[in-house]
Amino acid sequence: MLKKLRVGISVILFALITFYFLDFAALMPDAFHALAHIQFIPAILGGSFIILAVLIVFTLLFGRVYCSSVCPMGIYQDIVAWISKKTAKKKKRYKFSKAKNILRWSVVVLVLITFFAGYPVLLGLVDPYSAYGRIITNVFKPVYMAGNNVLESIFTSFGNYTFYKMDVVILSMFSFIIAIITFLAIGFFAWKYGRTFCNTICPVGTLLGFISKFSFFKVRMNENLCNNCGKCAMKCKASCIDVKNHTVDYSRCVDCFNCLDSCSRNAIKFAPYKKKVVKTEIVETTDTGKRQFLATAITTAVSVPAVLAQEQVTKIIRGENIPTRQTPLTPPGAQSQEHLLHHCTSCHLCISRCPSRVIKPAFMEYGIGGIMQPVMTYEKGFCNYNCTVCADVCPNRALLPLTMEEKHMTQIGRVVFVEDICIVKTENTNCGACAEHCPTQAVTMIPYEGHEGLTIPHTTPDICVGCGGCEFICPVRPNRAIFVEGNVVHQQRKAFEVEEKVEEKIDDFGF
């Protein structure tokens, strides 16, 4: 029953988390972003101390149940291992191997050093939730959307318009390559050896593994009943059961419970410490004060926020003396490039859920430290004036939640007008598309001096929110005649005046 319960919970959470990333039509309510908030690293960076405390308490009670049933990357490895077992010509058998503790803790130390030094990219690469989010967003979502387009073609041919066609694009080649490598590498080791990633590379697995040494319930072996057949070790995908010495490496056990039903002699059980079963009883009855101290120390250590400053990096793009954006645009709620840098693990949830599809993974826009973090781009859309989805779903508080009023007053960038390449000047023709798409009157049309009948854009940057409506709609290529220059630190825009409508009395029909 324990295994069935674990599998049931895992399947439900895995399906919901995966579809939430894939769901471009917003069929799932945004409230399901809570599934991201219960992940370990997001709980730390987001300051969700209640969730963090719950995860640690569950680990102290039952061991690494987070790794077995909550972490999507862990469940992905279980699925791969299950497929490998079902398709293998020979019966799949695992065997005990010694823990690679030097490698495990070296990764943790290196991640902490680089993170506090202002380079969170390494944490983003090895955080299991973020790595899984990138895989789904960059690899499987384009496939999912292509499948939608196939259904759209089929249904439309029968006069049914349930589906609508979507552009299938790769948002970032770099993020795509990283996602492919992560997907194949972790999948390969899961296929061959089971939970290798969890017990050698994953920093979450290492930290929770240390805490799980002190857990109340554990998989325990009864030396008196065991006949050393090794069936339990053959089923252990964590390779943590040492049959010869009748021990279990609890730092690597992920509570999959595959071993429990493999023993015909009932020599292995998931039991509390007071059961008189094995030698490990001596270890378990040691000073509980030390156990409490260690648990408290771990909770404090993983909750320390990043406070070191990171030098702001901007990318200057120039083309034939035509000014273009020099400072990248951070999404609403980021507050500043520095805040984003110290909280974002590049899980791509904001990128995947953005209804306007104007957020993409950065390459070098923020420098090396901000690789794959979200950056705004207006080539194929603009930020909806009344949308706060990206800030609402962010589990790390890299994008802080915004009310609609706060979103309307937040300036992520300022409008810049390049008159020399505007078609009003170059082609002596009226346009005005930028002014029509501006929600705050930061772009208006005024008479073009010396050109009777023509109007030209006039900008008021102080009331601009940086939504990019003007930049997106501008017909000038390759460089836009109007664009948004990012703010390194988000500002509060000034209020704009709403013109009062004067009612005119019209006699007759007004023709």
Image (cartoon, rainbow, N blue to C red):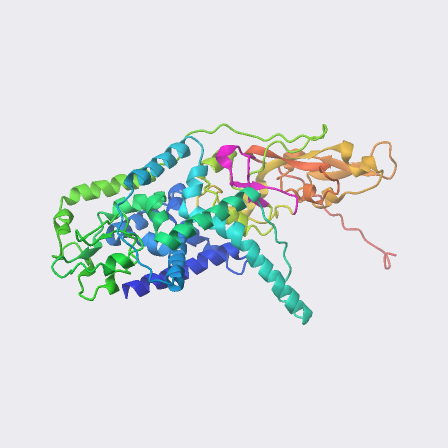
Is residue 115 toward the left or the right of residue 348 in the image?
Answer: left
Is residue 471 toward the left or the right of residue 445 in the image?
Answer: left
Please say whether residue 378 is one of the residues in the magenta stretch: yes
Q: Nearer the viewer, residue 86 or 225?
A: 86
* Residue found at x 22% / y 50%: 215
Is residue 15 toward the left or the right of residue 453 in the image?
Answer: left
**Residue 44, how many percent across, how many down?**
37, 43
Per the rendered image, the range of residues in magenta is 359-380
Q: Is residue 448 above or below residue 260?
A: above
Q: Is residue 120 above or below residue 17?
A: above
Which quadrant is home to the C terminus?
A: bottom right
Q: Nearer the viewer, residue 470 or 328?
A: 328
* Residue found at x 68% / y 38%: 442
**Residue 187, how many percent across, how many down?**
42, 52
Q: Nearer the viewer, residue 398 or 311?
A: 311
Which quadrant is home to the N terminus?
A: bottom left
Is residue 376 toward the left or the right of residue 36 in the image?
Answer: right
Residue 431: image quadrant is top right
**Residue 167, how many percent across, how many down?**
63, 54
- Outermost residue, bottom direction? 158
Q: Is residue 413 above or below residue 267?
A: above
Q: Could you tell me if residue 387 is visible in this image?
A: yes
Please say whether residue 6 is one of the residues in the magenta stretch: no
Q: Nearer the viewer, residue 304 or 122?
A: 122
* Residue found at x 50% / y 36%: 370
Q: Could you tell me if residue 392 is visible in this image?
A: no
**Residue 66, how many percent across, how many down?**
33, 52
Q: Is residue 491 above or below residue 378?
A: above
